[in-house]
Structure formats: C-alpha cells, structure tokens
Image (cartoon, rainbow, N blue to C red):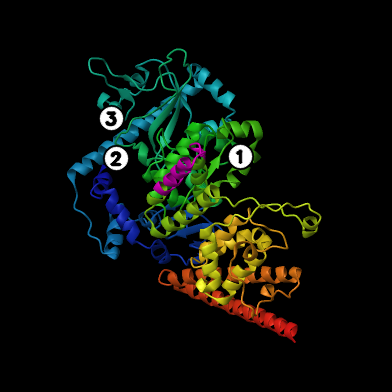
Amino acid sequence: MAGAGKVRSLMALSPQWLDELRMRTTLSAVIGRTLRLTKAGREFKVCCPFHNEKTPSFYVNDEKGFYHCFGCEAHGDAIRWLTDQRGMPFMDAVKELAAEAGMEVPAPDPRAAQRAEKRASLHDVTGAAQQWFEGNLRSAEGAQARAYLGRRGFSEATIREFGFGYAPTDRQALKRALERFEEPMLLEAGMRIEVEGKDPYDRFRGRLMLPIHDTRGRVIAFGGRILDSDANPNAPKYLNSPDTPLFDKGRTLYNLHRAAPAARQSGRMIVVEGYMDAIALANAGIDEAVAPLGTALTENQLELLWRQVERPTLCFDGDNAGQRAAMRAISRALPMLRPAHSLAIVRLPAGKDPDDLIRENGLAAMEEALANAASLLDTLWEFEKAAAPLNSPEDKAGLKARLLDHVEAIQHPDIRALYKRELLERFSRFAFPPRPPREFKPRGEWKKGGFRSPAPTLSDEARDRLTRAMQGGARDALTRAVIAGLVRFPDQILPHEDALAELARRDQNVGPAIDSLLEAAETLDLSAQSTISLERGLPAPPEKTSFAFLDEGTDPGDAREDLAEAVSLLVERPALESALAEATARFERDPEGSIADQARLRERLLALNERLKRFGRKKAAAADESES
C-alpha cells in the first residue's frame, strides 16, 4: 500500500503521546523561528507564508495549539508546520519537537502498524462508498431523494458541499459496486451487516445518504434518512454507521471540519440536535453549526467544542424532548466547568426546530434567538422551577434539593461556590417573597374617624423582648433609641418594614425585638394618640435623650422624620460591616480585589460614622434649645 511506511512510523505513536507532545510545544515559538509574529490579543498574526498577501490573515493560537490562515485555509499544529512549511518527514518533525520537549519517542509497535494499515484501508472503503452514493443521487434511482432535498429547500451548492447521496433498496447493491473490497473490510467499515445463518447484506438501503467526516475531512461513517417509511414502518427514520475503527460516535461531531474555521471567524459555535439541522443552518448562511450523532453530548464532544470557543451555544428543538436533551448536556457539562468555559442555551418556540424557524420566520428570527441565548445557570434555574408543581412547602424544598444536587456536581470550587450562592438567592426570593406593602391612611383620616384601630394584642413574649432591647439588650444607644422610637410611633413600623427586616437578619442582638414589632404591627393601636408603652406598660424612654424623636416636646411630624433618618443610618451600618467582613475573608483567594474592596468599604463606614455623629449632635443641640 502507498504510504504504508509512513503509517507504520505513525502508529508507533499513540494519540495520547502525540497530544502530550503538542501540549508541551509552544507553537508560536516554533513558527517564530521562521516568521516575525505580531501579538494580536490572545493570538499572534503575520502574513501567510503559504500564499501571497499584503494584510496578515495567518493567526497562531498557543492556547488551542493550531495556526490558521483565513485567506488560503491553511491549518495545522506544530507537527504540520514542520512537515508543510519546512518539508520535513513526519517522524523527523516529531523527533525534533520531542527532543525540545524532553520526551522520548516510543519504539515501533508492529501490532499498532497493522491497525494503522487497516484504518487506511477502511478509509478507502468509506471514500469509495461515498463516491458511489453521490453517483446514485444523480441517477434515475435517486429521483425520490432529489425530490426530498427539493422540498427541504436545499440549494445545489449545499447538496454538493455536504455530499448528499442515495443508497438503493437492493440488499446487495453496495457489495456489487465495491466488489474490489473483500467482505470482511466492508463489514468492519460498517457498510454491511452480518447475521448468523444469513448472507451479509447492505446496511443502508432506500435512504438519503450523508457522509460523516473526521476533523481532517476524511469520510469515516454515514448517516441515512429513510425515504419511504410506508414500505418498512419498523425501520428507524435515521440510521448511522456503527462504531468502527474509524468512527466513534461519542468522540465525533458532525460537520466539525467545516464549522471550526467558520467558528474562528464568528466567535461562536452552535450545537443542534441532528445533522439535517446543521445543514439547514448552513443552507441559510450560518456555517458554524455541528451536531452529535444520535446520542446526548458526551464529555469528549464538549471538550471538542471548548477547543473552538469558550461558550458554545446549544440550540435544541423547542419540544419537551429538545429541552430534556439540553438538560442532559448541562448535566454532563457541570462537572467539567472551568473559568471562562460554559454553555449558552437557546430555547426555540415550542414544536420548532432550527429549519422550521428559518423557513417560517426567516434567518433574522434565528439570529435573534441565538443573540438572546440564556446562560447555563439561567436555564438550570428555569428548568428545575418548571419541572414539578411548587404549591406546598415540601414542593419548594424539593426544588432546593434538586438545585443543590446540580451544584454538588461542579468540580471547580470557585464556580461551585458562585453557583450555590446565586441559585440559593434565587430560591430565597422565590420561596420567601417580601410581604406586599400595606395601605396606610393619612393622620387626617384618623381624626375624621376614617380609621378604626384594632385592639392591642402584643404578646407577653414580644413585650419581654422589647423591654430587654430598650433597657440595654441592644448593642448601642442608636439601636435602643430606634426601638424606643418605634414603640412610641408604632405607625412607623410597617412603612419601614423592609429596612427593619434586613436589620433583623443582619443583627442577631436586635433581631428578636424587631421581629416582635413587625409581627404585632397589624394588631396594635396605631393611632397618633396612643403608643405601645401606654397600652402595654413598656418602659418609657429616658427623660434625657439626645434623640429628639424620643422627646415628648418634639412636634410629632418632625419626630417621625427624625426617626426615619435614624432607621436608615441603623440599617446601613451592619450592611457595610458585613460586606467588609466578606471582603476581608477572601483575601487569600483574591488579595488585590480584597484590599481594594476593604479600602472602599472602610471609607464608606467612616462617612457613615460622621453622619451618625452629626445626627447625634444635631439632636442634642435641639434638646438643649428646648430646655433653655
């Protein structure tokens, strides 16, 4: 066989060994010996050495380990550069790079060489089969297949580009056409089926045929769509080649060899459910689409996608099956997430696939859907929220458990912590929504008799909590004063409900007293003439105080304004202190960001303390004026 010597040399090297060699080789350093590279973002650029050009279109990407020319489509890794640009034999190129990387070239393996020769032979089989299928499409037998392609709206250019063909219904047609290949080779290539007790027969019959290529553009397998389902109702609509020495469906993405160059130009990679969807997008002008081959996305396929772009877009059908496929892909991706690498998800209208959307609404509708793709986290939240009824506390607890199960699957510690925080915050807002604001009537309506106050129902426990807070249980004078002010003006409790609830959450010392005020606010006497202390025997505020809203001589309207300012100051301080503690705690993980946040928060705390001092001095001055 031609080239067998090269194949034997190749097969001394496992794919894993070659991947390690590429990983240890800095491509820009290898190419930089010959060309003067210019930095361009994360890549390097230069005028292409393979064709004449004045503006650089040749890019070198060390992170992904390849070079690519957008002018002549030259593409390859460090080995390919030495063989194509310097004309070195393959093994000489490998040996030179291995010596620089400190790696020892493995000794030849005769069995590996045999396997390589067999693979080369199987490529001959699949290549010959592809030529035969394409010829059949143009023959009289291919009329039904051509009619189907016409109904799908595929252009002649698309039909040629993707290599559509036709497999006739005759069970032995391919065997006769490829008679130069022995039966065992046809069986191993997946072109024929052998059943015990029966003669072998062609795998693909009466189907529109599509070749499946590897990343080098070689035909390695086929997919076939049935054209006359009535003739064989039990036959699958789509049929793919089985796994063979050439083809591993879990490690192959349909159309990747075409989509990868397009993705490098557009910056996006689109994953659709099937190869007909990928072709429909290409037919409409979107070339960067790939598809798995009859299975959910695998870990290997995700890695293939991330080698092209950092955030591939999953675009599955809008039906339930499509959404389940998206969730299976997300479940596979969660343990693999790493910084800057994620997924985007497009949710198409119910019952629509990409081809439907383009034919009915045009390419602009598809582009809009892609532009509005949701994040992985958003999709995870929406899917689980809609997965089951959420009518009871038990239902909601189940939602939380499902979300945390997903979080625990994430291996990267920082990403896991961020997902957990974000999902739990969303869950809390959903499961514990803020109480709706209550309607308050102006004091004028109270005096007119338009407000009827309910009987006071402050519990003994609540009264004890407030007593402790007002007698010194709260941590400082402002806190004690605010609680006393709310006792004196209970009509101000509910207008400040959100701020007080936040204070109770952040400050455990004052939390019970605040909770008591909020719980009792609906049933207490809220009239301007009566306070909690008068109704329930709570201790009166100190006679001498620097807070005018506690002074009996202060106008009630002015007192309520001062109390509102005091509540604002009281709530803001623990929030800043908590944020400062969080910034300090993450110093080891993010020293630069931590120091910057600490400085900013300390500055805000100083400004807040100055406001507190001015507030206290102002109130004290007002009290002195009233005494004089």
Type of amino acid under label 2? Ala
Which label sits on residue 2?
Answer: 2
Q: Secondary structure at mark 1?
A: helix
Left or right of 562? Residue 192 is: left
Residue 182 lies in what quarter of the image?
top left
Q: Quick check: can you spot residue 112?
A: yes
- Say the numbered circle drawn on residue 188: 3
- The disc at residue 402 is none
State which mark lies toward you, 2 or 1.
1
Residue 390 sits inside the magenta stretch:
yes
Q: Is residue 367 above or below residue 82?
A: above
Q: Residue at x 59, y 79 (%)?
A: 609
The Cα atoms of the two marked residues, 3 and 2, are separated by 21 Å
Mark number for residue 366? 1
- Furthest-top residue in view? 231
Badge 3: residue crowd in 10 Å (few <14, some 14–19, many ≥20): some
Q: Give the Cα separation between the discs numbered 1 and 3.
A: 40 Å
Magenta region includes residue 380: no
- Answer whether labels 2 and 1 touch (C-beta < 8 Å): no
Q: Amino acid at mark 1?
A: Met
Residue 389 picture location, percent across and down: 50, 36
Tell me which segment is drawn in magenta: 386-405
Query: Magenta residues: mostly which secondary structure?
Result: helix
Q: Position of residue 227 (x, y in %)?
A: 48, 19
